[in-house]
Image (cartoon, helix red, strand yellow):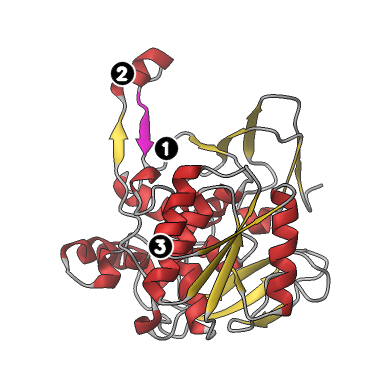
Amino acid sequence: MTADNTSALLRCTEASCEARYPIDERIYVCRKCGSLLDVQYAFNLSASVEQTKATFKSRRTTNSMLDQSGVWRFRELLPFVNDPSKVVSLAEGNTPIYDARRSAKYAGLDLLRFKHQGMNPTGSFKDNGMTTGVTQAVAVGATAVACASTGNTSASMAAYAARAGVRAFVFIPADQISYGKLSQSLEYGSQVVEIEGNFDDAMRLVRELADETDLYLLNSINPFRLEGQKTIIIEMMEQCEWQAPDWIVLPGGNLGTLAFTSQLRTWGPAPPLARADRIDLTARNISEVTINPKRAGVSCNVDLRVTSDGPVTVRLAGCK
């Protein structure tokens, strides 16, 4: 599905390193400096932006598995997959936008809309990223996938692993997981491993196992997870007739949700937005936030507001 002569590779997000690796290399962080990796494309699309938008829209009327996905319908923006038969999809995405008139009136706003990512197959936006993550796992020949999780990630990974026919292993900290999500993981056939400690301990263990065994890691440290999440903004913009909202407000969590903002500025030959400089985050239990603009897709002068339940320090890495 590589578009025209578009090429893809993995690149280190650290500005002082920027090491590059083949797109099919089984790697999660930079081998040279240990920083995060991003999937980088050299777009060479023959169609114009308007023609590409029209193609996205027309696919909504077909019965093709790829076109029914709210992620792979935008596949020109995900040209890391050469063989469409390897795509693992559950018709994720395609989540609605609700016009919240009563909430807008209560908040004193002229207009307020909600994009309901809970309408995904397993109930969270993680499905947008898991379709691309598991697709890459299949592409590199993985037979087992793994994650550390306390909720949504485990349910999503288990569902897509079952769809792909590969084994799934979920590492959870004792007594620290949503039972509703755990039940989904078990129903989809994953093996659940409970460990003593917290989420960080579970994450450290699964990363070590991924380095030492055949397990393919599918936490958000995996750059291909974030590729699917980037399409959320494209779908939202299409639903908004490509008119940028004044504000985008999103929950912070571990800030993996910021992946979609990179699509605001890096879409092919021309960005689809006239402005994309206001992002509001709501975070809990976070005292410090460091955002790498190349990873998150925001500029150094972005109007970034973080609402937290305590003092929070925000830094943009590489900005002076």
Residue 2, position as x, y percentages in the image: 43, 82
Whether residue 58 is visible, yes or no, is yes
Q: Is residue 221 above or below residue 104?
A: below
Amino acid of disc 3: Tyr
Amino acid of disc 2: Arg
- Give the number of the mark in front: 2 or 1: 2
Q: Is residue 33 above or below residue 92?
A: below
Residue 45, position as x, y percentages in the image: 41, 76
Query: Camera-side residue: 30 or 210?
Result: 210
- Helix, strand or loop status at disc 1: loop
Q: Which mark is residue 188?
A: 3
Which quarter of the figure has residue 66?
A: bottom left
The secondary structure that most of the magenta stretch takes on is: strand
Q: Earlier in the sequence, mark 2 or mark 1?
A: 2
Q: Could you tell whether 113 is left or right of 200 in the image? A: left
Q: Which residues are magenta?
A: 111-115
Q: Which residue is mark 2?
A: 102
Residue 299, position as x, y percentages in the image: 65, 48
- Other residues around mark 1 within 10 Å, as few (<14) / some (14–19) / many (≥20): some
The answer for how far apart the CA atoms under marks 1 and 3 are is 38 Å
Q: Could you tell whether 238 is left or right of 161 in the image? A: left
Residue 123, position as x, y percentages in the image: 39, 47
The answer for how far apart the CA atoms under marks 2 and 3 are is 38 Å
- Other residues around mark 2 within 10 Å, as few (<14) / some (14–19) / many (≥20): few
Q: Which mark is residue 245?
A: 1
Query: Camera-side residue: 111 or 44?
Result: 111
Q: How many marks?
A: 3
- Other residues around mark 3 within 10 Å, as few (<14) / some (14–19) / many (≥20): some
- Helix, strand or loop status at disc 3: loop
Whether residue 241 is visible, yes or no, is no
At horizontal 78% and vertical 64% (from top left) the residue drawn is: 15
